[in-house]
Image (cartoon, rainbow, N blue to C red):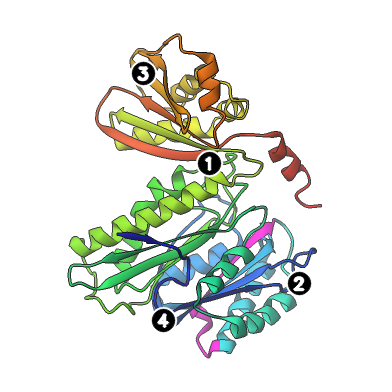
Amino acid sequence: MKVIDGGITSAKGFFAAGGAAGIKKNGSADMAMIYSEVPAEAAGTFTTNVVKAAPVIWDRDIVRSGGLVQAVVINSGVANACTGQLGLAYCRQTAEAAARSFGIDPLEVLVASTGVIGQQIPIDKITAGCGMLKEKLGSTREDGLSCARAIMTTDTVSKEAACEITLSDGTTVTIGGCCKGSGMIHPNMCTMLCFIGTDAAISKKMLQKALSDVVPETFNMVSVDGDTSTNDTCILMANGLAGNADIISEDEDYKIFHDALHAVMTSLSTQLARDGEGATCLFEVKVINADTKENARILARSVVSSSLTKAAIYGHDANWGRILCALGYSGAMFDPEKVDLYLTSAAGELKILENGVSTGYSEEFATKILSEDAITATCDMKMGDASAEAWGCDLTHAYVDINADYRS
């Protein structure tokens, strides 16, 4: 596998564009489009929040129907959530507008929205934007970046990842994507909005299996603030233009593809966590030697989601009691008198807990470790050989400021 500089336009046959449709008051880019030159197989995962935005319902139904997809239209600024039947009607109108531009069926168009909940989207601006974006579509690196930037809300940076793999028949396959998310991030399926394109030839069944297998270990292990969005959507499209033999079973090529998808989604996950609203650092939690994979995930996610722990990270305070406490209320059973805890960053590594008791570590060195912009807490449970990683960020005053003023 080779990591490359790229995003949604990296794979063959994928085009993208971003631009300003007049949705956001400040006139910044607020609408994006992704297009595959041939119809693509589509897989998706969606929010488990009972309150689901209209685009989630539209996309979920299309993906589950098994139909091919050729275009995606995304707007930022307004979420089209809690908007009733009119919101659903606007999804159809958006899809119809895009479909007319390309001469395709509206059911081959997915839609996605992100922004303020409870407001109706300005449908006239959206439908006009479909035509505007169609004319701007391109397959360059910059075109992919413009798409990634246009879907941002409180994000401070765009988020992209891509890689190339070689399958058993020598065919080169590319996977690339972009995502957005900074606040209301505690996914129970994937992330806020994520779009991934690949030129691999792979069956719908195997594509969905790969996505569904990777999501629990990547996007579902991210937490910024403990809030699961109404709009969480992850779409994976495969157009087959690489020309490889169809991946139709869990063979060696499937494993290669699965591992590459995992790498791309891991990169996007860490980018989400690092750009958490108001964050000053990436906070990674590794749980090692747990009894089961599921318990390792539960433990890691509990620590990375702890508001008290996140506040301590912001204060550069090695308050290990908060980490042990978060492990304890996670719901996973373990012996607290066996737990070892390490803190690691570019400044070094420090064992601060051994068998559930403080090591008498240097507070000065601990503070130095916690003053870096990427920090890892490793929890050794000494129960088995299962492990998991979770990603989050510190909790700062800026987080409250951003969300107190979000609608205004």
The percent coordinates of residue 286 (x first, y second) are: 39, 33
Q: Which residue is mark 3?
A: 339
Question: Left of 331 or right of it: where is 248?
Answer: left
Query: What span is in magenta?
Result: 102-116
Say whether residue 189 is visible: no
User: If you read the primary sequence from the N terminus, does the residue marked by circle 1 or circle 2 appear first?
Assistant: 2
Q: Which residue is mark 2?
A: 22
Q: Which residue is mark 4?
A: 39
Q: How many marks?
A: 4
The percent coordinates of residue 58 (x first, y second) are: 54, 69
Q: Which residue is mark 1?
A: 223
Q: Secondary structure at mark 1?
A: loop
Q: Are marks 3 and 2 in contact (CB under 8 Å)?
A: no
Q: CA distance from mark 3 to mark 4?
A: 51 Å
Is 331 located above or below residue 20 in the figure?
above
Q: CA distance from mark 1 to mark 2?
A: 31 Å
User: If you read the primary sequence from the N terminus, does the residue marked by circle 4 or circle 2 appear first?
Assistant: 2
- Choose top left, top right, bottom left or bottom right for residue 25: bottom right
Q: CA distance from mark 4 to mark 1?
A: 34 Å
User: If you read the primary sequence from the N terminus, does the residue marked by circle 4 or circle 1 appear first?
Assistant: 4
Mark 4: few/some/many CA within 10 Å (<14, 14-19, 20+): some
Q: Nearer the viewer, mark 3 or mark 4?
A: 3
User: If you read the primary sequence from the N terminus, does the residue marked by circle 3 or circle 2 appear first?
Assistant: 2
